[in-house]
Image (spheres, rainbow, N blue to C red):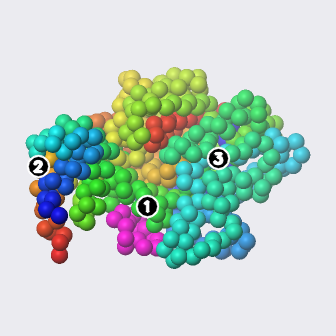
Amino acid sequence: MGETVQDKIIAIIAEQAVLEPSDVSLDNSLDDLGIDSLGLVESIFAIEEAFDIQVPFNANEPEASEFDISSVAAIVKAVEGLVAEQKV
Amino acid sequence: MITGQGTINALGHDIPTTLEAFREGRCGIGPLELRDVDRLSVRIGGQVKDYDPEALFNRQQIALYDRFTQFTLIATKQALDGCGLDFSGALATRSGVVFGTAGGGVNTWDENYRSVYEEGKNRVHPFVVPKLMNNAAASHVSMEYNLKGPSFSVATACASSNHAMGQAFNLIRCGMADVMVTGGSEAMLSFGGVKAWEGLRVMSKDACRPFSANRNGMVQGEGAAVFLFEEYDHARARGANILAEVVGFAMTSDAADIVMPSQQGAARAITGALTDGGLNPEDVCYINAHGTGTAANDKVECAAVAHAFGHHADDLMISSTKSMHGHLIGGTGAVELLACIMALKDGVIAPTIGYEEADPECALDVVPNEAREAKVDACLSNAFAFGGLNAVLALRAAP
């Protein structure tokens, strides 16, 4: 299982956007990829399941959440942080 | 005509206590008391507290009545006791029941799934199906009071009660019934019921603050409200105490998104209810809002009201009592109709509590935090459901 956090997240987001992983780039926003609010909530659920972590996210105040969803790269960074933090 | 009302909800187990809470702006939302609450991330709700079913129902009844049916029967008893109607003979066949509920017997589903999946049991109680079905409450009320006319249940998520009461209104208006027992009930505050909502990530973990800039989601409630709708001449002939008059009803579908509300769909329902009730926008002084406290609903609802009412939107009052009793999902429109009747009958507007910061996207008079006195001749009650199904009722003060 040599898959990195980044590979896994790109796979999750690509599946949500109905794209090939190769079509998802790190500087894309979810909006760029055509993922709406429901798709976002579903992606976060998939991320929580894949990494066995809790993602602090309330759809009512996405900006207020500590979980940065502004781009694919930001999500990867945030998940890496949560994985390290919640490993214990 | 509305000639009877009853309720049980987080604010009180009857009408006087609930209306007093509306007047005082009291909050019925608090820590949830239910099994496995430590496995929930949302732990608040508008729960019916100090509730003892054994004191109200016998063992056989409890075996058959899910919590949502119990709530319905309690509210119905208040609405019908002392109403002076004898449901026998011809009146029985001219009287029916329509109730809204989104989930029906959620606690029954939950308890029995737990028993077969978690506890590994291979046998369930024989009454599981009649207990959990959405029409159980309507059926038990029809049996208890001998109501033999048109009777059914309506499930349109958060608009269920408004759709149900609209059907009751239409059945009387088109001559299919003289008396309808109507309203709605919900008892979704079980582990599974709350867990399901948690998944959508639209729930607040601290409070329901409709229209406030710092709102962060909805809070679930539970309970029921039941009304007696009666044809005008029928009510007049027997000298019934008329609480208010239902004058209009409209329903629309957004046909757009399964969860996101549409300004256009909501505005069409509001305008439709006005037109159906023969009301001019200027006649309406108060709207009981859907006002869930989510980012999406509240701004879309305010935009819809502004669009439907034009400049008059700035002169009317709009409040969300969900801030006090929580969102009763399929039962919510029924409990909220109590606030409409209070406005028309007593001249008291229930407030939107928990209001802390003005939101430019909700720039209407939301009656923040304190009830207000006002003479109200006509009002609306909004309900906009997931699935884009909207139902708005228009009411007038008793003639």
Q: Nearer the viewer, residue B288 or B95?
A: B95
Q: Chain of mark 1?
A: B
First along the sequence among labels 1 and 3: 3
Residue drawn 65% across and 74% down? Answer: B54
For mark 2, what is the residue?
A73
Distance Cα–Cα, label 2 vs label 1: 33 Å
Q: Is residue B397 left or right of residue B264?
A: right
User: In this view, which residue lies farthest toward the right?
Assistant: B89
Dot 3 falls on which chain? B
Q: Secondary structure at mark 1?
A: helix
Q: Residue at x 23, y 63 (%)?
A: A51
Q: Is residue B350 left or right of residue A85?
A: right
2 or 1: mark nearer the eye = 2
Q: Secondary structure at mark 3?
A: strand
Residue B211 shown in magenta: no
Which tag is nearer the camera, tag 2 or tag 3? 2
Q: Which residue is mark 1?
A: B194
Which of the chains bears the disc numbered 2?
A
Mark 2 vs 3: CB contact within 8 A: no
User: In the rendered structure, are the residues bearing label 2 and label 1 in contact, judged by CB atoms less than 8 Å apart?
Assistant: no
What's the amino acid at mark 2? Ala
Asked if residue B48 can be seen in this view, the reply is yes
Name the kind of residue labelled 1 in the image: Val
> Which mark is drawn over residue B220?
none
**Circle 2 sits in a helix, a strand or a loop, which is it?**
helix
Q: Which residue is mark 3?
A: B153
Q: What residue is at 36 percent from the left and 56 percent from the top?
A: B199
| Quadrant assignment, res B275 | top right
> What crowding class fits label 3: few (fewer than 14 Cα within 10 Å), some (14-19), or many (20 or more)?
many
